[in-house]
Amino acid sequence: MKWLVRMLGGAALLAIASGQASDAPQLPQLMECLRSNLPQRAVAMIGATTRTARGEATTREVQLAIRRGRPDLDATLWTLAPPELAGVSYLIQHREGTDQAYAWLPSIGEVRRIRGSGSEILGTTLRTDDLRQALTGFSGGAVSLGPAGQVHGWPTRRLVATAATDSAAGYDKVEVEITQPDCVLVEARLYREGRLRQTVRAQADSLRRQGRYRYASVFDVQVPDDNLRTELRILRLDPEPSLDSRWFDASRFFRRPASAAPTAARP
């Protein structure tokens, strides 16, 4: 997820905002604009529809809670639908430059630590390793300013983040397009060893506002080496809610409270 929040979108900004900015004159102002458009805490309801090359589709609905600090960050993902997968949950914790990931599987009734590259998230094109790096993978890396451009007619500015040389992250570079002047992520391209591995692009007419925050609400996710295509939709968003610390506890994160439901976003 450099993108799973606003599922994928905001997470990419979290990763970039934790990198080390170069001294290009415009970069500090753009980084500050990005940070001001990211809530410290958020709960989002997200729908994901994945289609095969033959047009077969599967749909999932999840709820994502994020709590970030400097430099720590926590994210919990609860599965709501379809019924046969309801309750499957994931937790990612980032502490002092290291991260850990856990999964709760109701069928076996226990929490399991996720190691290595992780596993696919609910049959989508996204993997637990994607979510883990989206939130933490570029910490300690470098951020530079790219050229101006356009996405769906929105004026944008490019940011390029590279991973630290000792990073074990699955991607070593990400390029993102940020709207001007609102600082909304509308496109991300993820690379490994010079090869494009994944693209995330906001759909036209998908910009939304919730409180003082603006974000893109629908993203298309494509993996060049895979025939699957995933559409991510932020159905509802609650920025700066009260979050129970138990949601980010490795022994209790899977116990999603009914009070976690976010409010609806506005166009």
Image (cartoon, rainbow, N blue to C red):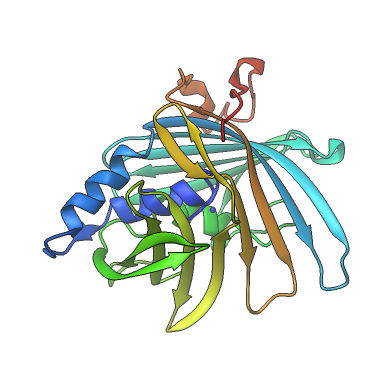
Residue shown at 61%/15% (left/top)? 259
Between 186 and 225, the one nearer to me in the picture = 186
Residue shown at 54%/75% (left/top)? 197
| Residue 195 visible to an observer of this rendering | yes
120 left or right, relative to 100: right
| Residue 249 visible to an observer of this rendering | no
On the image, which quarter does residue 260 sit in? top right
26 left or right, relative to 213: left
Q: Position of residue 235 (x, y in %)?
A: 65, 36
251 left or right, relative to 79: left
Q: Position of residue 172 (x, y in %)?
A: 39, 72
Q: Position of residue 51 (x, y in %)?
A: 80, 62
Between 30 and 85, the one nearer to me in the picture = 30
Where 7 falls versus 76 (above or below)? Answer: below
Q: Position of residue 23 (x, y in %)?
A: 11, 63
Where 154 falls versus 215 (above or below)? Answer: below
Where 92 falls versus 195 (above or below)? Answer: above
Between 18 and 165, the one nearer to me in the picture = 18
On the image, which quarter does residue 192 sit in? bottom left
